[in-house]
Image (tube, rainbow, N blue to C red):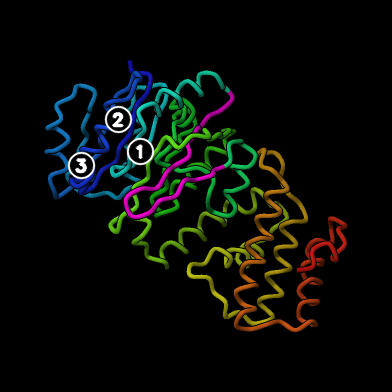
Amino acid sequence: MPKISVVVPTYNAQKYIVETLHSLLRQDADFELLVLDDASTDATLDLVRGLNDSRIRVFALEHNQGRPANANRAFNLCRGEYIARIDHDDIAEPDRLRKQSVFLDAHPDITVVGTQIRHFDEDHFTSDFPLDDANIKARFTVGGAYLANPSTMFRREFVQQHGIRYDPNLDIVDDLGFWFDCMLHGARFANLPEALTLYRVHSGMTSLNLDSAKLYEAKIRLYARMLPAFYPRMTGHDVANINKLYAHPIEIEMSMDDVLALHRSVGVALSEIDLRWGADPAQLEGGLLGMLGHRMNLRNQKHPRSEEDLHRCNVALWEGLESRGIPWKSYQE
């Protein structure tokens, strides 16, 4: 059996798929390559089959099921000890698979390892994802810069044992939901410091063609589960208030009563942080306060708060924090 199963979900990828697969076929590692096609209507399948490489296994759907459901098929099809992910338009550096598998071999306590990513094509940027488990998990709550799904490699036995799958109801944030579920079952995370995955930025990519309303609905569903796991004093009312921080575009037309309620809910969240998941508590605290501060700065540009209103906001935050005995002056904006 191969050491690594590389999973490449595809849909109408004829423009990029050959370049992506060539970057994988040149890897210095023991692997199989699973192409999971979601009923493409272009030449994707012909191009994949035309490569005629025994390491490629093709699994084509007759009817489109959507990205999460398509990717979920891989878990019962893979044969490797490790599963590696990459998108159908990205590129793997020649030593990516080897370096990730060597890392997992040497660190049996780590379940998932990602890499830094380097944007190319229509954008040029290199990520600076945290390398350690505590900071990666803390980044979950701000919804970004934790790890890149198409750069990851993880232990197949772990996800199979716990039956973890991508949730089709989470739309574009299904990957974060997947990692959160892994965390709840005891997973530990890491990122390698090298940019071993090239992330293509182009006009047709999913993340640049989002339905903002559907994205926000998916975030609400996800964070309704996630926030109480990290901040156990939160009630449903507090979750609903803090979920407003994840709106896209950011909503700045908030009444002063809503602003005060938001500060109070943030205080409640920070009054107790659950340490059992191993996330960095300082980062969990700073991330939430950072999102609150960003929202208020945007609102202040259009609706500046008076000194009295600033004081009321700090008092509301302190009221939420009160059970932890923290002086409200330490949280003044």
Q: Amino acid at mark 3?
A: Leu
> Residue 240: x, y in percent?
60, 66
Q: Nearer the viewer, mark 2 or mark 3?
A: 2
Residue under numbered circle 2: 24
- Which residue does the image show at 34% across and 18% down from the upper left? 30
Instruction: Look at the image and give the residue range highlighted in magenta.
Output: 109-129
Residue 128 shown in magenta: yes
Residue under numbered circle 3: 61
- Which residue does the image show at 17% across and 44% down from the upper left? 62
Which sits in the foreground, 26 or 170? Answer: 26
Mark 1 or mark 3, which has the lower sequence index?
Answer: 3
Which sits in the foreground, 216 or 191? Answer: 191
Q: Amino acid at mark 2?
A: Leu
Report the quarter where the C terminus lies.
bottom right
Disc 1 vs disc 2: Cβ atoms closer than 8 Å? yes
Q: Which label belongs to residue 86?
A: 1
Which sits in the foreground, 196 or 205? Answer: 196
Q: How many C-alpha atoms fall within 10 Å of the one at disc 1: few (<14), some, or many (≥20)?
A: many
